[in-house]
Each structure stands twice: as structure tokens, then as C-alpha cells.
Image (cartoon, helix red, strand yellow):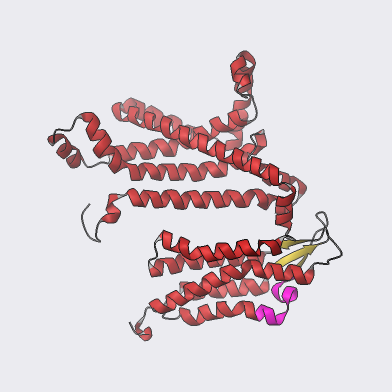
Amino acid sequence: MPRRHAPINRVVPALALVALATWLALPLGSVAPNRIVPGTAYTLVAAIGWPLALASCLPLLGLLALAWRPGRLGYRLALGLTLLLLLALPGWLALMAQQRLDPELPQARLGIGAAWWLALFWLCLLLVELRSRLALAGWRLALLMLPVVGGWWLMAGWLKPLALWQELAGRRDAFLEALVDHLLLVGGAVGTSLVVGAGIALAMRQNPRVERLGFALLNFLQTIPSLALFGLMLAPLAWLASRFEWLAALGVSGIGWAPAFLALLGYSLLPMVRNTFVALSAVDPGVLEAARGMGMSRGQVFRQVRLPLALPVVLEGVRITTVQAIGLTAVAALIGAGGLGTFIFQGLGQAAMDLVLLGALPILAMALAADALLGALGRRLDPRTDLAPGATP
């Protein structure tokens, strides 16, 4: 299609303009002589000078030029420029560290400013827009991101003055331990809720009274604030641990992993049960009748027809529950359950934003990864995705 007849795209130029404005106007980073003293913020121009600042804006200007009535080639070039901008992001911080940090102050550190975080955010939105315009499958976009990830890994050696990097270097063992604790709590709560939730959903399907009572209880449980639920479990678990030695030997007490696990399990049950119940109930009765007409037993109909058809919706429940549990586990650090939330609350107590980010960024990354992987798996298992547009499932 000639470019003059291509539809106008307003999203790409709007995102490029906003990214350009925030990139130039907001601080790229801050320089502090040590961990205690507040840093001095620098905009892009003040940090690396006008010539390099203008050079960093050239890809964004290129995006603006390509964005008006882009064809498929224009979208591909825009995608290449976006990936180039993402690849170069850590390089600007490394350049700022080289020009602004005093080599005679070994404790000096570089904080990441709002311009850098917002640039990352706008570029991710651009990727989403260009991916949809080019109809790129998730795995193709992941392959395109490999050079970006590799470039960031190669530049890691230049980013050691970053305050975030120094916080990680000083707490590497504690960080790994917290990461494992976080994953164990999330995995245990989601796995247990999947088994228990499936049992409850099957019982609900057999008895309407169980359905009404079960959903009422789960809805009520979901309305209790997480901190209040943690507090409500302190006394009963402490009493049980004092009465039964085997529970105390397992590490069950009023604080720690036990109340955190039970609270996460309680919060996970509603989305798991609701999705499983709806998925099993929504299977087309005609398909089930056809399976019975072929001589299948009740168990065969469930295993070979109802469960495979219900699986995409059940996986949607697992996805929602996993993302929710990853975030809620951060709060569990308040009752001594460990996890990455420990760094968040330590950082808030010490007014150390880089320590907060050390806990918050991995949680964000885990939630996004779980959402993408489980969403892709659900789409892969959904038989409707294999149908041609307009076909009847």
C-alpha cells in the first residue's frame, strides 16, 4: 500500500513525543558522595552535555518521522529504532557515571532518575504497539529482545557505580535467600490452592448448597485486608504450636512462613475456585452428549473431553492467582516470612529508595514473566486460537 494511503498512527508519535519531552526535561540520574547524603540530580544535558544529549534523541526523532502513515516497512524500522533505544539506555547511565562521579570518592554512587525510568516505560509501550501492528507472536518478540538483553549484560561492568548495583553487591547472599523464600511461598500457595480449589469446585458442581456456601465464605475471606488476616492468625497458630510439638518442629508459629502461607492460600482460593467452576460448567452440553454417544464412560468424558476444554480457563485462574500471590508475598515480610518484601520495608525505614527498588523490581519482573508465560500457555491450549477468523468453535 502506498504510504499516502496508509492509515494514520497516532499512538507511536504521541509516545515518541512524550518520551522525548521527559527524556530532556526530567533528571537522568543523581550523584551522591555516599549512601547517607542525598544526591544531586542532573538532567540529560547537564549530565553528558549537549552533543551527546542530541545524539541520544536522534532515534526518537526518527520514530516521529516514520510514525505518520507508516507502512509495514515503516513499522519494522520503528521497531528497530525502539530496540536500539532500549539497548542504549544503560549506556547513558554509564556515560553519566564516567563524567560525573569523582574517582577520588570510592563511596560515591549514581542514582537512576525519573527520565530513565520513564524512558523505559514509554519504550515498552512502543514495543507493545509495534508488536500488535506487525502481528508479531510472543516468541518472535522474545527473539528480537535477545540482543537487547545481551547488550545490557555486556554493559553491566560499567554500571557498578549505580546505587542499585551497590545495594545488591552488599546483600547478594541475603538477596538470593529472599528470592528463594519468595518463590517457595508463591509456589506453595498457588500449587496448594490449585489442588484444594479443584476439589472445592468439583464439590460445588455436585451440590448447589455447597456452591452458595463456598462462594460466600471465599468472597468474605477476600474482603479481609491482608495485614488484618496476618494479624488474625498470630494467636491461633502460636497456640497450636505450643500444644503440638510436631507443629513447632515444622517451624509453625505465630509469625514466619506459616501465617503467610495460610493467608496467601486463602486469598488464592477465590480466583482458583471461580475459574475452575466456571470452566467445568461452561463446556458445551452437545459435546458432552456426543462423547457419551461414542460410548465413553463418565470418567473418560471428564478426562478426555470436559477437562481439556476447561483447561484454558483454569489456566487463566492460575495466572491471576500467581500474579496476585507474587505481589501479596511482599507484605508477608512484615510478619517475618522473609521474601523480597524485606528489602522494601527496610528501604522504607531507612529512606533508601535504591533498597526499596532492590526488592520491588524483581517482584515486578516475576509478575510480568508469570503473566506472559501463563497467558501464552493458555492461548496455546485454547482450541479457538486454531480456528480461522469467523469460524464457529
Q: Position of residue 69 (x, y in %)?
A: 41, 80
User: Dividing the picture into quarters, in which one does residue 279 lie?
Assistant: top left
Q: Position of residue 35 (x, y in %)?
A: 80, 54
Residue at 78% over, 70% down: 100
Q: Is 8 drawn above or below residue 135 in the view shown?
A: below
Residue at 48% over, 66% down: 127
Main secondary-structure element of the magenta-colored stretch: helix
The magenta region covers 42-54
Is 53 colored magenta in this rendering?
yes
Of the pair 173 and 97, the residue shown nearer to us = 173
Query: Quick one: which residue is furthest to the top in this view?
Result: 243
Q: Is residue 219 visible?
A: no
Q: Is residue 244 visible?
A: yes
Residue at 56% over, 62% down: 149
Q: Is 247 drawn above or below residue 120 in the view shown?
A: above
Left or right for 267, reference 92 = left
Of the pair 368 and 200, the residue shown nearer to us = 368
Residue at 56% over, 44% down: 327
User: Dividing the picture into quarters, in which one does residue 326 lie?
Assistant: top right
Q: Position of residue 18 (x, y in %)?
A: 57, 72
Q: Position of residue 232 (x, y in %)?
A: 60, 27
Tag count in the figure? 0
For the N terminus, the image quarter is bottom left
Q: Is 78 drawn above or below residue 258 in the view shown?
A: below
